[in-house]
Each structure stands twice: as C-alpha cells, then as structure tokens.
Image (cartoon, rainbow, N blue to C red):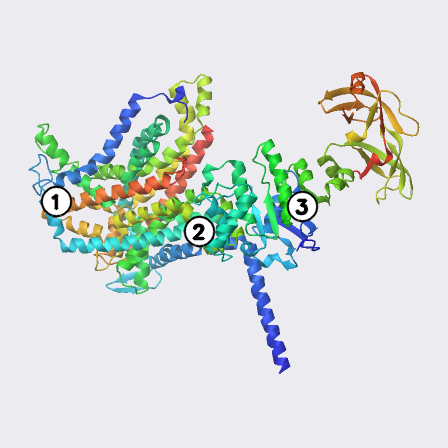
C-alpha cells in the first residue's frame, strides 16, 4: 500500500517538476514566446499559400485528360510550354507590357511624390490619403471605367466626335496592348507613389542645404543628392508594380482584346474551358520563375549601378 | 512646424503637375457615376438626359442583392480574422527578439507581391485535391491570405510607436498576458485595429480574381458585376452599382487611412 | 517582514545576449527593509539585473530567490516585486486614479476599498487633487510620482526603481531623493534602485553595488565604499581619488612599510592578502585627506613638499593641484575654506607642504 503511494507520489513529483521545468524554459526563451504568438498567422499562411504552392509544383509534373488527373511524374507540360511558341510569345508580351507600364507609372508618379514630399507643408496627411486612395477601391471597376473611356463609342471617341475633332472613332484606343498599359498605369500609380514618397520624405533637408552652400543649383541638387537618395524607393516601387502586373488577368480580359492577351488569360483557360490543370500549374510555375529571374537580374543590376554612383 | 527654407520654395510647375495628376487619378473613375445618370444604355457623349431609373432598377435586382450580401459576409469574416492574425503578428514582430524574424516577415508579406492569379490557382488546386467544394468559405480563405499582410503592415507602426514598458508595467502590476492585452495593448493600438478592419473589409469586398477562382455557386459582388459586363443592356445598372460601391469605398478607406495615420506625425512609415 | 535575513538572494546570475555578456556572475544577498542601489555607468548591466529581478529577462545561468522561492518559475505578474520604470510607462488612455488603481483588479479589491487606497497613496506621494488628470497633462515629476504610487499601492515586498529620477532637473531630483528616502524608511520595504549618479546612490542607500561590465565590483555601505574601496575602479568611480604607484618594502602584522612614488617611505595599515613584501601595489588618498600648508607641518606627521600647479576657488572649498617629484600626475587636494588667510598665501608655483594621517592611505592592488 505505502509502496504504491510512494511511487505515485514520486511520479506526481516528477511530472510536476517536468512541467515546472517546461514553464521555466518557456519563460526564459523570448524567441519561443514570440513564435507562439506568431504561430496562428504562420499556420494560416502555410495552409493558404505555402502548401498550395507545393501542391502546384507537384501538379505541374502530372497530366490530365478529361476529368482524370494522372499523378505519374512527367515533364510533358513543361515540354509543351517550351515547344509551343504561343506560350513564349505570351510570356514575352506580358513582360514587355508590364515593363512599359512599370516605367510609365514610376515616371509619372515621381514628380507627384516629389511635390508632396518637398512642397506640401500643411495638410500633408490629406494629400497622402488623396493620392493613395484610388488604389484601395475596386480594381475591377477601375479597369472597367477605362473600358468605357477608351471604347469605340466610349468617352474619348464620342467626346472628340461631338466636338467635331474627328469623324471616325479612333480604333487603336481599345483592345490593344496600349490600352492595357494605360489602364495598368492608372491602376497602379496610386501604389507606386508610396515607396517613392517615403524615400523622398526621409532625405535629410540639411543635405540639400549643404549642397546649395557648396554651389549646386536646383538641377544639380536634384541630380546629385535627391535622385540618388530616392533610388531605393524607386527600385522598390518598380518591383512592387512589375511583379503583380505580369500576372494580371482582369485588365487584358477587359481591355486587351485578342492582341492584348497575356499569360494570365491562358492560365485561366487551363483551369476553365480547357480543363488541363497540370498545364495551368506548369504555366504558373514558369511565370513565377520568369518573374523571379527578372527580379534577381534587376536587383543585381541596380546594385551594380548604385555602386558606381556611390 | 518646419521653417520653409529656400530649398522648399513653392514651385508653380510642380503644383500644376500635381493637380493634373490627381485629376488623372480621379477623373476616369468619375465617369462611372456620371454615366449612371445617363438616360441611355450607351456610354457616349453627348449625354442623352439625366435619370435615376438605373438606380431604381438596382433595388429590384434580386441576384445583385444576393451577391452583395455574400460579399458583405465574406468581407466581415475576412476582416476580423485578418486583423486578428495581423495583430498577433504585429505584436510578435515588434516586441520579441526571435531568430529568423526577417525571413518570416518576408514570407508573411509575400502575398503583396505575388500575382493574385497564382495564389488563386494554387489555393484552388489545394482545395480541389482535398475534396473541399468551392464556396464562400474557400473565397474567404483566399481573402484572408491576401489581407493579412495589409493588416500587419497597418498595425506595426502602432506597436512601434508605443512604449514597450507599458505592457511590462501591466505585467508587473499583476496582469497576465491576456489581461495585459485587453486592458492596455488593445486600447492603445485600437485606432490601428479599426483601420485594419476597415481596410481589410474593403479589400475583400472589392477583390475579384481570387474570388473568381475560388467561388462556387454563390457569387460575390465583383463576380456578379463581371458576369453582367457582356450584356449591353445591363451596363447602366452596372454603372449605378459601381458608382455606389466607389462612393462607399472611398469613404471607408478615407476613414481607415485617417485613423491609421492620425496621431503619428511620422509620414515616413513604410509600406502602405 | 523586515529584518528577515537573506530575503533576496541573487546567486551566480549571468545574462548573455548572444555573444554579449550583459551580466556576469553576480552574487548579492539582501535583507528586508534595505535601500540598495545598483550603481554604474551605462551598459554596466545594472538595468538588466533589475529586469531579471522583475522577471522581464530570464537569467542565462544562476537563480534569483525571493523569500527562498526560486523566481525562474515565476512569471513577472506573479512576483512579489513592483517596478517604477525609467520612462514611467503611465497608461495614456487612463487618468491618474485609474492608473494607480490598475494593479488592484488582480488582487480583487472592490471599488470602495480601491478608491480609499488610491486616496491614501495619492496623499503619500503628494498628488492629492490630480486624480482626474491624464498622462499628457502631467509634468515629468508628477508622472514619476504617479508611477511610484501605482507601484506602492500594491504593497510590494520589493520595489524596483529604474533610474526614476534621471529625467528630472537637478533641484527636483534632489527633492525627490529626500522624499524617496523618507518614504522607504516609513514603509520599511526593500528598495532596489538603479542609477549612474554616484552622489545619488551615496545619498539614498544603505548599501551600494558598484557595477562595471556586468560584474559587481564591490558591495558595501556608502562609507565603506568611500573609505575602503577594494579596487582602483571602485576607488575612482566613487568620488575623486589620487593614485600613486608603490612597492611594499616590509610587512609586519597589520602594518606595511611602502615606498610610494613621490611620497617616499610611508606607513599604512593593511590586512589585505595582496600586501606582501616586494609586491607592487597602488597607494590611494582622497583629496580632502591631504592637508595643505605653506610651512612644514609638525614633527611626526608624514609630509612631502611640492609645487603648486593650479588652484580653483569654489567658494566653500578650494581645489589645488600640487606636483610632487616622483609622481606622474599632480595630486588633487581639497581644502575647506575655513581660514581664508591660508588660500591667500597659496599661489601658483609656490612651494607647499602636503601632509596626511597614516590611516588616510588606502592600499589597492595594481591593475
């Protein structure tokens, strides 16, 4: 009888000291406590992003016919993607359109960011909100509004016609890569402006005063002080626009027409009409790889250039 | 108040540019409400006459209301969960020293830069392989993924701007982690929480691509709108709806951004 | 509760942040009711040690015992300590009364009792009438008192104070020092006080731990630290000190005969181990223990002649710098201005005499 009590007491004590030690361990480790707090978020991200990516990679090596997915490993999707000139052409077109749009957006946004950073002194908050506000509203609606502006009987054409400036509507406006670039530039401008603004705002004004003191005029100050120091923001903005726009689906669907088809549209079709999911997965992976490569090259190049300047 | 040194002299050209730029940003969008009052199903100048009948018709539109309600449901659930997850993440990232913090933050922020179609398609593959049917639930999953980085980015500045010793003081005075959060942390970061809720709701409400891939038989409002776009006679109805959505979005986001940035004179807080 | 020996025991406590050793093997024992200061320059580890007592950092090695209970298993909110933070950490969303009463929720104090205690403590810190104000409506000194009140209302056994007076101006700081001291005496609880200001530590404390680079150099009463420092670091940190190299010529029982640079053959009392025949040590003497005179002092007094280098008249006292043959640096001498005729006769380049009592010399190990 007493033996049993003794051993069960001892077991209880061991368990108690175990849990005490664990508690002490937990309290000691700040990193552990931080990760516990972070864990719900990480779990959700893992389930909705990381695991799906993993499966998508796996699926790109499968094949599908009809409704059956054959999980045997095969490279035929990638083979087809490389062989058929259509995909390569679409990828190149997507990259070109994105690249043009990115450049255009950054070019038109920079002076605006500059204005608010340097020349607005009262109600800055209002300006910041105003210039970023459109970005938070419905993307679909913003693209659609350009559709009605650029259309055959759209705002521009009917406006110019009723003003008597043209007889026939301009056809190049809608359903072309140009339309896509315009629409995307408009849609993403409000997004581009923020990183540029932030890096301009951070520039220490006394640096400019020092430059002035040393004899630089306004143009010189801009080229030699402001611009280089704002470059991190510009680079960030370019990446933040380029990557999502390469994969844009809505804009080409609404205003691109057959000439403006982009890679995302073909991917969508794989999951819809064509019903070849593994192919869609493979094309998505290829898009990601392309984006990744371009990003790496871009960052590397900018690093080379900034090293030259600095 | 900073003195305006001669470096910051007012610049006429730039100001004009700024105003033109704002016009370029807003005017295209304003055509939606403009033509929603047009008495014609064609979007062209000159205006055929003013009418509110398209708005009137909206209110009788059952499918529209159904999809609107779906979007609201998804939006509310998304904003609550994203804000919660973003809140924990913001607190963990700003208050604790953790090994490997930077890569982890990078991963959490990834949805901001990955094309939505890729994330939508990947999630679609997952739920399909797992045999989960497409529904508003799957749409919500996708939306939470998209909104968490925004939520975290909205709340991190709030945490950074608030003295860590407050929470330590609360603990020192006897409150455990939950009560410290409830009595001290939450009241102080509340404007950020509110801003995040509003922002995430708006993002989810307006989000089209992920919803397009992940929705089942019940459409969200953007999906409904998209489906109407191929019917010319439905066009003005879409315009009316779009105009309403835009107005509400503008107001909600304005409040959210105002809340988020007010009380911090720091306009250099990075990210959105 | 007070008078309880070994109430707080800090045993072999170290704290590492990665490769950085913030606190290095600290051993301190405190009895109840003490005013104990942790004194040192920034980065010496004193605040880290305090935070380990509060529970906000965990020791990498070692253990802290309060009332014989090991604190490593006890989270901050369960510890019998309360802290006054350097930044005061007044909750901005609550008024003064709500701030002070904050910690009473956990103790399940009802509203009436809580209000009564808040009034009591407001009177204690002399903030009656400030109850409805918010943090941004208070001055630095007032916020400091709110922080104090908020901690004291919990009736902790140990009050931890992290440089609470650092942000106050000199006059206010001195007032608060007196208040804190009398408060501590009245309440009879242990105060552990962190500061970099040695005058402050000397004014307030029963005992001081002088810290540097994470180590506790010496622990003792202000008097002991001042008159009998056991290392050059401590001697130099507390007050001003003159240092001279010396070698031990002879040791007999508790008396040593030294050959000191500049002073020549001197006698000093010492029981220390490091004072052995032939050892190289350091002789230290406080400026105020050097008696300066124009003429040679009487027989039997140890004395040496030197040349006046510089003099500073401070009103209540004067500082002189006298160079001695054989000593590298001039010796600092502090003299009270009791007899003004003396200072008038001492000018630069004048020959002066310095004398001292044998027990004024402090022997310290070299290096």
Q: From the viewer's side, name the closer residue of C363 and A274.
A: C363
Residue A244 in view in this figure: yes
Residue A292 in view in this figure: no
Residue B183, numbered circle: 2
| In the rendered image, the vertical position of residue A103 relative to residue A291, given as above or below | above
Question: Which image quadrant for residue B128?
Answer: bottom left
Residue A17 falls left or right of residue B154: right
Q: Tell me which chain the residue with mark 3 is part of.
A: C
Q: Secondary structure at mark 3?
A: strand
Callout 1 touching callout 2 (CB < 8 Å): no
Q: Secondary structure at mark 1?
A: helix
Q: Give the x, y percent position of residue C257.
A: 90, 36
Earlier residue among tags 1 and 2:
2
Which marked residue is nearer to the observer: mark 1 or mark 3?
Answer: 3
Which residue corresponds to the image point at 33% horizontal and 40% vertical from the top-left?
B257
Which quadrant, please, contains the C terminus of chain B? top left
Q: Which residue is mark 3?
A: C36
Residue C332, numbered circle: none
Q: Which residue is mark 1?
A: B236
Q: From the viewer's side, name the closer residue of C177 and A133.
A: C177
Q: How many numbered circles does the render carry? A: 3
Which residue corresponds to the image point at 26% horizontal and 41% vertical from the top-left?
B251
Which marked residue is nearer to the observer: mark 1 or mark 2?
Answer: 2
Q: Secondary structure at mark 2?
A: helix
Mark 2 is surrounded, within 10 Å at the Cα level, by few (under 14), some (14 to 19) or many (20 or more) other residues, namely some
Q: Give the x, y percent position of residue B160.
A: 45, 42
Residue B174 falls left or right of residue A305: right
């Amino acid at each position: 009888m007493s033996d049993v009590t003794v051993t069960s007491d001892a077991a209880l004590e061991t368990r108690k000291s175990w849990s005490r030690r664990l508690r002490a361990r937990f309290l000691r480790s700040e990193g552990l406590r931080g990760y516990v707090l972070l864990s719900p978020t990480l779990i959700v991200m893992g389930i909705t992003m990381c695991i799906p990516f993993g499966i998508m990679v796996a699926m790109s090596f499968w094949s599908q016919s009809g409704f059956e997915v054959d999980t045997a490993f095969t490279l035929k999707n990638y083979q087809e993607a490389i062989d058929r000139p259509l995909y390569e052409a679409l990828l190149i077109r997507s990259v070109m359109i994105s690249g043009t749009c990115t450049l255009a957006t950054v070019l038109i946004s920079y002076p605006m960011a500059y204005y608010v950073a340097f020349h607005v002194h009262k109600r800055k908050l209002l300006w910041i909100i105003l210039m970023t506000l459109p970005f938070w509203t419905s993307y679909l609606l913003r693209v659609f509004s350009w559709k009605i502006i650029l259309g055959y009987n759209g705002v521009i054409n009917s406006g110019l016609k009723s003003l008597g400036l043209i007889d026939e509507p301009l056809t190049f406006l809608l359903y072309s890569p140009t339309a896509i670039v315009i629409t995307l530039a408009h849609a993403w401008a409000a997004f581009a402006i923020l990183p540029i603004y932030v890096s301009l705002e951070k520039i220490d004004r006394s640096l400019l005063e020092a430059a002035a003191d040393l004899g630089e005029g306004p143009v010189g100050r801009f080229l030699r002080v402001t611009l280089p120091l704002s470059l991190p923001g510009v680079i960030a903005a370019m990446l933040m626009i380029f990557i999502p726009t390469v994969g844009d689906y809505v804009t080409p669907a609404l205003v691109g027409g057959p000439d403006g088809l982009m890679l995302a549209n073909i991917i969508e079709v794989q999951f819809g009409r064509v019903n070849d999911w593994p192919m869609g997965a493979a094309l998505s992976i290829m898009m990601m790889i392309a984006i990744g490569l371009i990003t790496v090259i871009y960052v590397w190049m900018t690093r080379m250039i900034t090293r030259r300047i600095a | 108040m900073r003195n305006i040194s001669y470096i910051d002299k007012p610049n006429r050209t730039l100001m004009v540019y700024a105003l033109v730029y704002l016009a370029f940003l807003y005017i295209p969008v304003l055509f939606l409400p403009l033509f929603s009052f047009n008495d014609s199903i064609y979007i062209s100048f000159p205006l055929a006459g003013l009418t509110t009948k398209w708005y009137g018709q909206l209110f009788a539109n059952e499918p529209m209301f159904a999809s609107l309600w779906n979007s609201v449901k998804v939006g509310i659930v998304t904003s609550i969960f994203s804000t919660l997850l973003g809140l924990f993440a913001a607190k963990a990232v700003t208050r604790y020293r953790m090994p490997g913090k930077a890569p982890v933050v990078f991963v959490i922020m990834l949805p901001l830069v990955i094309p939505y179609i890729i994330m939508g398609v990947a999630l679609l593959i997952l739920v399909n392989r797992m045999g989960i049917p497409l529904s508003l639930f799957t749409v919500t999953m996708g939306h939470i993924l998209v909104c968490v980085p925004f939520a975290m980015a909205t709340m991190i500045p709030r945490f950074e701007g608030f003295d860590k010793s407050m929470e330590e003081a609360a603990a020192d005075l006897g409150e455990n982690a939950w009560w410290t959060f409830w009595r001290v942390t939450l009241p102080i970061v509340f404007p950020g929480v509110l801003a995040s809720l509003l922002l995430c709701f708006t993002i989810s409400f307006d989000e089209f691509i992920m919803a397009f891939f992940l929705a089942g038989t019940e459409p969200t409002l953007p999906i409904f709108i998209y489906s109407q776009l191929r019917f010319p006679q439905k066009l003005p109805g879409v315009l009316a709806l779009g105009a309403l959505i835009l107005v509400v979005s503008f107001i909600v986001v304005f409040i959210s951004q105002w809340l988020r940035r007010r009380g911090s004179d720091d306009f250099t807080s990075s990210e959105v | 509760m007070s008078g309880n020996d070994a109430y707080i025991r800090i045993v072999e406590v170290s704290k590492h942040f990665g490769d950085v050793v913030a606190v290095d093997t600290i051993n301190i024992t405190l009895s109840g009711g003490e005013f104990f200061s942790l004194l040192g320059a920034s980065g010496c580890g004193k605040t880290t040690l305090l935070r380990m007592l509060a529970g906000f950092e965990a020791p990498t090695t070692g253990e802290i015992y309060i009332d014989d209970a090991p604190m490593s298993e006890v989270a901050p909110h369960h510890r019998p300590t309360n802290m006054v933070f350097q930044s005061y950490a007044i909750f901005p969303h609550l008024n003064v009364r709500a701030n002070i009463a904050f910690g009473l929720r956990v103790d399940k104090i009802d509203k009436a009792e809580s209000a009564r205690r808040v009034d009591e403590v407001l009177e204690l810190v002399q903030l009656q009438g400030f109850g409805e104000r918010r943090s941004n409506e208070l001055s630095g000194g007032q916020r400091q008192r709110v922080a104090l009140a908020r901690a004291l209302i919990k009736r902790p056994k140990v009050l931890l104070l992290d440089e609470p007076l650092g942000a106050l101006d000199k006059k206010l700081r001195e007032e608060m020092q007196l208040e804190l001291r009398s408060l501590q005496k009245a309440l009879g609880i242990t105060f552990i006080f962190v500061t970099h200001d040695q005058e402050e530590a000397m004014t307030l404390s029963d005992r001081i731990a002088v810290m540097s680079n994470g180590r506790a150099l010496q622990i003792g009463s202000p008097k002991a630290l001042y008159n009998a420092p056991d290392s050059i670091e401590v001697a130099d940190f507390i007050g001003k000190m003159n240092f001279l190299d010396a070698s031990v010529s002879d040791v007999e029982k508790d008396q040593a005969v030294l050959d000191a640079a500049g002073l020549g053959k001197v006698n000093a009392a010492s029981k220390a181990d490091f004072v052995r025949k032939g050892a190289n040590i350091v002789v230290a003497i406080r400026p105020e223990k050097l008696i300066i005179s124009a003429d040679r002092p009487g027989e039997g007094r140890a004395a040496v002649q030197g040349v006046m280098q510089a003099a500073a008249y401070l009103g209540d006292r004067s500082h002189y710098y006298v160079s001695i043959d054989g000593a590298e640096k001039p010796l600092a001498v502090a003299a009270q201005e009791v007899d003004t005729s003396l200072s008038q006769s001492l000018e630069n380049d004048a020959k002066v005499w310095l004398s001292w009592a044998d027990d004024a010399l402090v022997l310290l190990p070299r290096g």
